[in-house]
Amino acid sequence: MSYHYEGEILIKKLELGRFGTNGYIVICPQTYESIIIDTPDEADKMLTEAEGTKVKHIIITHTHGDHLGAFREVRSKIGAPVAVHPLEAERLPSPPDYTLNEGDTVEFGTISLQVLHTPGHTPGSICLLTGKHLFSADTIFPAGPGHTRTPADLQQIIKSITEKIFALPDDTLVYPGHGLDTVLGKEKQEYAVFAGRPHDPDLCGDVLWLSA
């Protein structure tokens, strides 16, 4: 687990389960209200790290199984309302309490998170933004986009990244659904290399900006 504390926000990042999926507990240091972003696995660890905070929301960025292993237990024991994009709602183990669309906000304590709908990895994938902190789930990682199953999906995720994520400032800190954090300026530079080269029209899957 790692911590990020910058005065106005405390982020607990937990790498959980056999896929090393990142779950996040985001805390308002002034009120100790919090949210949980994704419930990958190892519910006991998530529940322990959430102790001492008042969890106001459980937000699921998309409904792949590696982000839902601890969902039932975390939801049952914490009891906070669950939210997901409408296109993902039917794939949750149980129905959400509400849904999140592009431009919606989620508030807890003094923190407000903006919802970005970023389809490509899944139809209803979302990212969450507060200040210079972006929780990017499986939309963008260090060195490339999230996994895509078809060339059309790759074009869709690139559209999401270039039109919505790359519109953010270069110093935006990116907290992905797997692996290490990154800074958006670095990703913009590496994408520019990718965009300047021709590519196989069938390209999809696990793509890296500098080697695809």
Image: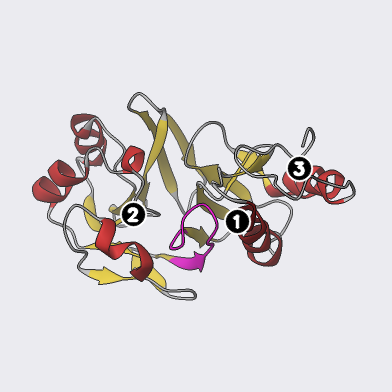
Q: Viewer-nearest of labels 3 and 1?
A: 3
Q: Position of residue 137 (x, y in %)?
A: 48, 48
Instruction: Identify the secondary structure beneath mark 3.
Output: helix
For the point 83% across and 51% down, the residue is 195
Report if residue 107 lies within the magenta region. no
Residue at screen point 35% across, 37% down: 66
Q: Position of residue 95 (x, y in %)?
A: 18, 63
The colour scheme applied to this rendered structure is: secondary structure
Residue at x 24% of width, y 30% of height:
42
Which of pointers 2 and 3 indicates the residue nearer the eye? 2
**Which region of the structure is painted magenta?**
113-125
Which three-letter amino acid code belongs to the residue tagged 1?
A: Lys
Mark 2 = which residue? 60
Question: Residue at label 3?
Answer: 186
Helix, strand or loop for disc 2: loop
Residue pushed farthest top? 18
Q: Which residue is mark 1?
A: 132
